[in-house]
Image (cartoon, helix red, strand yellow):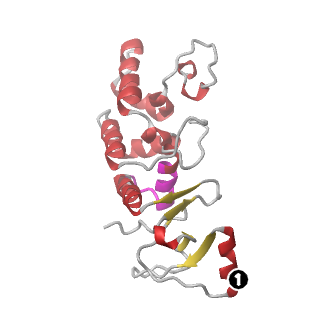
Amino acid sequence: MLGKSLASPFLTFGSATPYCFSTPLDLATSTRNIVLLNVNFSNGLRPDVLRGAWSTNFSSKKWEIRSTAQIENLTLSDEDRKAWEACRQALSAFNFSVEEEDKILGKAFGQFHSPYWGEERQREVPKFEIVNGILDYLRGLSLANDDICKLLKKFPEVLGCSLEHDLKTNVQLLEKEWGIKGKSLRNLLLRNPKVLGYNVDCKGDCMAKCTRCWVRF
């Protein structure tokens, strides 16, 4: 059971729960296409903690992700919401808050702005198999959960990188070209985890992808 899955200001959604407008002013907000509702949940959490954002198209049963800074919005179907919750569960071993989990997933999969991706990252809903596969691979590099926690805080975008084309390729390159493996690799990844996502080598001739270039290594 995902006991903390509904507590985040980043990801606000409800289930099949009652809703109502309390004042005429609330009705007027529908002209702005978004209505904020107080939602009653059976789990006992305060309604003021769980303020949902419901589109005026009630029949679509969509839910909205919203960052606290109102930077990015995303409408999720029920199926996508379940996928997001599953990915939160994959991160539960690292004792992040729900807000931190949502921020990590949001930055990794283009929901929240990240300078690392620039404009190239399309928004997508994270998939449990992808997130869990990358976490398992990191554990296979002799990284403990505490190490992975630190790595994700520094470089949450790693979860949105390609396991085959980025992570595995780069780890092999580090061993082949520089002899970095084992403890040395662990120390490097804790110091500079972005090396896992490098996929450009401009040889010093800038390709406007400096955040992903080996010239930074």
Q: Between 14 and 47, which is closer to the camera in this rendering? A: 14
Q: Quadrant of residue 133?
A: top left
Percent position of residue 27, x then y: 66, 81
Q: Residue at x 55, y 85 (%)?
A: 20
The reply to whether residue 11 is visible in this rendering is no
Work out which quarter of the rendered image holds the N terminus and state it: bottom left
103 magenta-colored: yes
Q: Residue at x 58, y 71 (%)?
A: 56
**Magenta part of the protein: which range?**
94-105
Asked if 131 appears above or below 95 in the picture, the reply is above
Asked if 62 appears above or below 122 in the picture, the reply is below
The reply to whether residue 214 is visible in this rendering is yes
7 magenta-colored: no
Q: Main secondary structure of the magenta part?
A: helix
Q: Residue at x 68, y 75 (%)?
A: 29
Q: Between 187 and 100, which is closer to the camera in this rendering? A: 100
